[in-house]
Amino acid sequence: MNAQILDGRFSAEKIREGVKKSTSKFFEKTHQRPLLSALLVGTHPPSMTYVRMKRRACEEVGMDFRLIELPEHIKTKELLGEIDSLNQDERVSGILLQHPVPKQIDEREAFDRISVSKDVDGVSSLTFGRMSLGMPSFHSCTPEGMIRLLKLYQIPIEGKHAVILGRSPILGRPLSMLLLGENATVTVCHSRSLDLPHHLNQADIVAAACGIPKLVKGEWLKEGAVVLDAGYSQGNVGDVDFESCSKKASWITPVPGGVGPMTIAILLENTLQAACSSLPR
Ligand code: NAP
């Protein structure tokens, strides 16, 4: 079987067009633009690139973007103070703390300080809990982007067996909850899981999110599996061995141009939603 491509660039562009139109309407109504504020601690080069990409994406759809750059050695308490100011600033629609932060920072405490109404990246414990229970909340951007990709290509999720590689709080874990919410049967594998090939061979949907280049091999897959690759390592390499997997899968995301563009599109959508929800009723 030669897999068809789940085109994240095309799908993200559709979402961004919708966000751009709605942002323009928001501006006509309020004479304000939704504002995403990003906190960047230190000068981690990939993080600086991600933040630049997010700025460009905001500007392209007509949103404002504010970057707060903080020194590498900042303490958790000082970072919490910055988050408090953004929580209180009525002009700020959404807050994004760029991951990862330097080691001395308690990232969980910082994520949890972001007000739920501005948590457009879906990182706080409260947002996670609400999302997991199917309550109204922002969904973590990358997992939601992966679900949306399946839906845009009308790939059934209900009743399917989804196997996820990775259980991180920003990716594997929230993805497992969203897939469960879509009535998939979900298996979550991690670094201590035994016999990955055995688990992957049961999967109708494979979601690789572990950051190990080309870990998933075609011979591990069930014929016709749908393969989502969220991994991204240096040199534009995903967690899936595209060459062998695309021979066995029915659908597959490329790297780059698969899951990555969807993440930013969902971030924009969430920021717009946060801005709309903040308007007086
Ligand atoms: P992370 O925090 O390092 O988590 C990695 C997860 O993979 C952990 O749960 C780990 O298990 C698990 N793992 C490690 N080795 C494994 C193995 N051999 N088999 C199965 N699971 C294994 O990473 P992350 O932040 O979730 O990111 C994962 C990947 O996604 C990275 O390549 C990152 O660049 C990419 N990413 C992409 C986007 C995007 O927009 N496309 C966004 C975010 C991240 P333990 O829990 O047992 O340690």
Image (cartoon, rainbow, N blue to C red):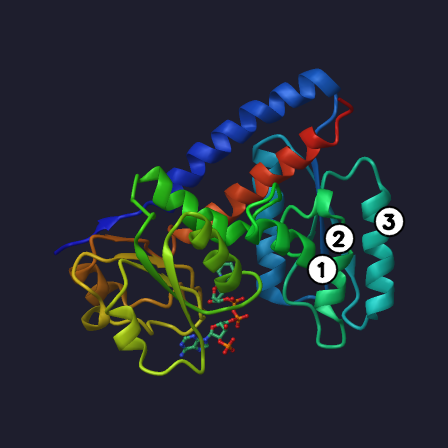
Q: What's the amino acid at mark 1?
A: Phe
Pointer 3 or 2: first along the chain: 3
Q: Which of label 3 and label 1 is nearer to you? A: 1
View extreme (top): residue: 28
Q: Residue 209 in the image: state x and y as whole percent.
A: 43, 65
Pointer 3 or 1: first along the chain: 3
Tag of residue 161: none
To which quarter of the image does residue 59 belong? Answer: top right
Whether residue 102 is situated above or below residue 96 in the rendered picture: below
Inter-mark Cα distance, 3 to 1:
14 Å
Check disc 3 and report its element: helix, strand or loop: helix
User: In the rendered view of the protein, which quadrant contains the N terminus?
Assistant: bottom left
Label 2 packing within 10 angstroms: few (<14), some (14-19), many (20+): many
Q: Name the residue that disc number 1 marks.
A: 111
User: In the rendered view of the protein, which quadrant contains the C terminus?
Assistant: top right
Residue at 83%, 71% (x, y): give it.
75
Whether residue 58 is situated above or below residue 123 in the rendered picture: above
Inter-mark Cα distance, 3 to 2:
10 Å
Q: Residue 258 in the image: state x and y as whole percent.
A: 38, 51
Inter-mark Cα distance, 2 to 1:
6 Å
Q: What's the amino acid at mark 2?
A: Ile
Tag of residue 114: 2
Q: What's the amino acid at mark 3?
A: Ser
Check disc 1 and report its element: helix, strand or loop: helix
Residue at 27%, 76% (x, y): give it.
197
Q: Nearer the viewer, residue 195 or 16?
A: 195
Residue at 42%, 33% (x, y): give it.
14
Q: Residue 178 in the image: state x and y as whole percent.
A: 48, 52
Check disc 2 and report its element: helix, strand or loop: loop
Q: Name the residue that disc number 3 marks.
A: 85
Asked whether the residues under the numbered discs 2 and 1 touch, taking CB atoms below 8 Å apart as contact, a structural biologist would say yes
View extreme (left): residue: 1
